[in-house]
Image: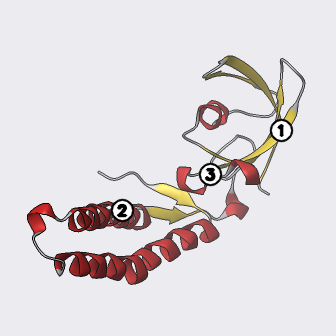
Amino acid sequence: MSKVSYYTAEGLQKLRDELNYLKDVERPKASQAIGEARDKGDLSENVEYDAAKEAQGMLEMRIAKLEEIVANARIINESKIDTSKALIHSTVKIKNEANGQEMTYKLVSPTEANLKEGKISVDSPIGKGLLGKEVGEKAAIEVPNGKITFEILEISRS
């Protein structure tokens, strides 16, 4: 059984665009590279052919993965997100109890995560630790450097 993932319309469109690019542009390039390598002679000693076949295999694996993700993707209507708890597509403002630093993150699906944009995956340690929490609650989260405690300051849809 495949895992359903929730996306914004923009995030799902990015996945579809990447899938179409891989199918329409990269797949023909890979086939052409294999054909050119095959034309160079003996396949048993043709390193270029082996490399092209391996690259094609990796490309096909990526295409299959994206097809599975897109097939199981659901778009979230962000206007209907419950802001009483931290859920996927919630924007959560937190405070690190140890140093007082405040941060704001949007909880997103793993493929939409981008720390530079303030988007963290719901599958990350911090994302998992924040899910289901309410404003005023504390979340003790195990990270590679130990345990960090965050206080939930605000939850919004933006």
In-front residue for pair 98/47: 47
Which amino acid type corresponds to the residue marked 1 in the rendered image? Met
Dot 1 or dot 2, earlier in sequence:
2
For image coordinates 59% across by 31% down, the residue present is 125
Check residue 113 in the rendering and tell me which mark sits there, or answer none.
Answer: 3
Gap between marks 3 and 1 measured at Cα: 16 Å
Residue tagged 1: 103
In-front residue for pair 41/63: 41
Asked if residue 109 lies left or right of residue 100, the reply is: left
Which quarter of the rendered picture does the C terminus lie within? bottom right
Gap between marks 1 and 2 measured at Cα: 33 Å
Q: Which residue lies furthest to the right in this view?
A: 100
Residue tagged 2: 68
Q: Is residue 45 above or below residue 23?
A: above
For image coordinates 75% across by 20% down, the residue present is 149
Which amino acid type corresponds to the residue marked 2 in the rendered image? Glu
Gap between marks 3 and 2 measured at Cα: 18 Å
Residue 6 image offset from top left, x and y in percent: 54, 57
Residue 35 image offset from top left, x and y in percent: 22, 81
